[in-house]
Amino acid sequence: MLNFKFIKFLPSEYVIRYRNGKIVQEGVGLSFMYFVPNTSVVVVPIASSDIPFMFQETTSDYQTVTIQGEITYKICDYKKIAGILDYTFDLKSRKYVSEDNKKISQRLINITKVLAKKYIENMDIRTAIKYSDKLAKEISEDLQNSKEIENLGIEIMRLSILAINPTKEMSRALEAEAREKILNKADDAIYERRNASINQERTIKENELNTEVAMEGKKKQIKETQLEGKRLIMQKENKIKSEELDYEIKLEEKKKELIEISVENSKARADAKAYELSAMMKVLEDVNPTVLQALSNMGMSSDKLIAMAFQELADNASKIGQLNITPDLLQGLLKGCENRG
């Protein structure tokens, strides 16, 4: 019973059990009783593994770059890789009897290094340090199509290039060169900004001058229009004044004609009246003045007759000795005048 033992493997391990050199059992995560003298076991890990790598290559301009990345793989053909590498498992110590299980990582790194060298040696330093993504894609495609990988029974799940770095001296040189370019670009940008500012200021000045010229032209046009309008107004006013003068002249001529006619008429009336008076005077030359006086008093009102009587009394005052005029007489005369008024 001491030579019979029990062993149990993990679900992430593919186990091939041999008895006397022949396969008697295989599978994932097996557990079984075995007879120690005639039993051997091959254990192949089936979980994916990550292999970090870092190696140096030389670019076309003889500059050294360090390529850093990671490969993720898993074993897909367990029997094939067990036939190439020794995955024999010591059941007593529960360890691999050889270091072959670690060789797969170095083999993948060596294949990756050969493929990277093919691309890097055709690039200059500036191109190489910017080529990480494309390089990872190209190497990954080459690994998928690699016969050596296929013969190992391995599947490459992912390859990533984390960085492609130059040496410190070259990095500082590239930084200095890039810094100078950036500074030159900054200087060019400052110059362009200043030049643009000058051009913009010149454009603004030109626009201001053009605006002033346009404004002066508009002012001149407005002034000419105003003068032309004033001239037209003066012409119209002169025309109106001329028409008014013509009208006044014609009116004065009409007035002159009217005055002449009026004078002639007045003269004719005066001549007629003088002739009438002359004829009347000739008739009255031989008539007694007293009779003429009596005739003129005919039809006069009593107050006028009284006034004439007083007038005659006044004319003959020197001949009158004494005359009494009572207030009653004057009051009666005034009433009579007021009633007639």
Image (spheres, helix red, strand yellow):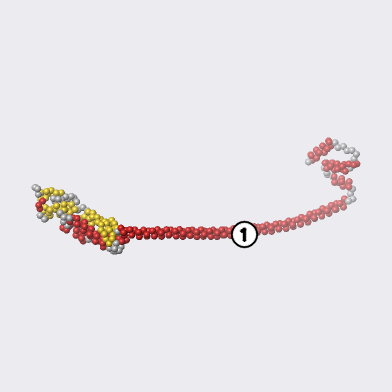
> Mark 1, residues whose alpha carbon is within 10 Å: few (<14), some, or many (≥20)?
few
In this view, the residue in front, 6 or 233, is 6
Residue 277 at what x, y percent from top left?
Answer: 84, 52
Instruction: Quarter of the image for the C terminus: give it.
Output: top right
Q: How many marks?
A: 1
In this view, the residue in front, 283 or 329, is 329
Residue 212 at what x, y percent from top left?
Answer: 53, 58
Residue 156 at what x, y percent from top left?
Answer: 23, 57
Residue drawn at (60%, 59%) of the image: 227
Residue positioned most to the front:
169
Q: Left of 249 or right of it: where is 139?
A: left
Q: Left of 10 or right of it: where is 305?
A: right
Identify residue for label 1: 231
Residue 114 at what x, y percent from top left?
Answer: 24, 61
In this view, the residue in front, 245 or 177, is 177
Residue drawn at (21%, 58%) of the image: 107
| Residue 270 image-quadrant placement | bottom right
Q: Is residue 338 above or below residue 150?
A: above
Q: Secondary structure at mark 1?
A: helix
Q: Left of 2 or right of it: where is 190?
A: right
Residue drawn at (73%, 58%) of the image: 253
Q: Left of 245 or right of it: where is 127?
A: left
Q: Is residue 203 above or below residue 297?
A: below
Q: Amino acid at mark 1?
A: Arg
Residue positioned most to the left:
1
| Residue 248 image-quadrant placement | bottom right
Q: Is residue 159 visible?
A: no
In this view, the residue in front, 291 or 90, is 90
